[in-house]
């Protein structure tokens, strides 16, 4: 989440509820590691996590999340909601393919999608 968005949300939350918020930002794997290590050390400093789905699933498997209770769950795409509802998506990333129609003819396009891999 962009820092400007996080600051706006936490400022409004603090004004409404009087609770001071500390924001800690890092890469998704570092956030996951910090939460797990702090739990093992008996520190319970985290109340809200905004992280990637894979890292959220890891927190679910570690038993570090509580189910989300919200009437707005029905507004979400059903396939985007994990069955356990220990976390809910805040963003949907859409990936599309595009090509230069001046360089590649439609008939030369692949007929079948290959599997995406990371290098």
Image (spheres, grey):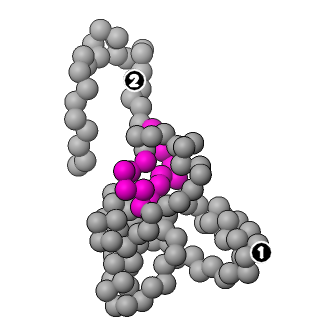
Q: Who's the residue at 38% across and 85% down the image?
A: 38
Local SS, label 2: loop
Q: Who's the residue at 48% across and 78% down the image?
A: 46
Whether 105 is drawn above or below 69: the answer is above
Q: Which residues are magenta?
A: 81-94
Task: Give yes or no for residue 93 being in the magenta stretch.
Answer: yes
Along the viewing direction, whichever of 8 and 2 lies nearer the viewer: 8
Whether 71 is drawn above or below 37: the answer is above
Give the mark toward the camera: 1 or 2: 1
The quarter of the picture where the N terminus appears is bottom right
Along the viewing direction, whichever of 115 and 62 lies nearer the viewer: 62
Q: Who's the residue at 37% across and 56% down the image?
A: 84
Q: How far is disc 1 from disc 2 in space, using C-alphas?
A: 48 Å
Q: Position of residue 88 (x, y in %)?
A: 47, 55
Tell me the tag on residue 99.
2
Whether 68 is drawn above or below 39: the answer is above
Q: Is residue 30 visible?
A: no
Along the viewing direction, whichever of 106 and 54 lies nearer the viewer: 54
Please give left or right for residue 40 compared with residue 43 in the image.
left
Q: Quadrant of residue 95?
A: top left
Residue of label 1:
15
Local SS, label 1: helix
């Amino acid at each position: 989440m962009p820092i400007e968005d996080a600051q706006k949300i936490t400022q409004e939350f603090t004004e409404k509820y009087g609770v001071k918020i500390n924001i800690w930002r890092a890469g998704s794997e570092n956030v996951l590691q910090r939460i797990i290590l702090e739990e093992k050390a008996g520190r319970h400093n985290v109340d809200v996590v905004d992280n990637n789905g894979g890292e959220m699933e890891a927190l679910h498997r570690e038993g570090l999340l509580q189910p989300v209770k919200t009437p707005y769950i029905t507004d979400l795409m059903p396939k985007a909601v994990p069955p356990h509802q220990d976390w809910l998506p805040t963003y949907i990333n859409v990936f599309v393919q595009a090509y230069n129609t001046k360089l590649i003819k439609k008939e030369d396009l692949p007929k079948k999608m290959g599997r995406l891999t990371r290098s």
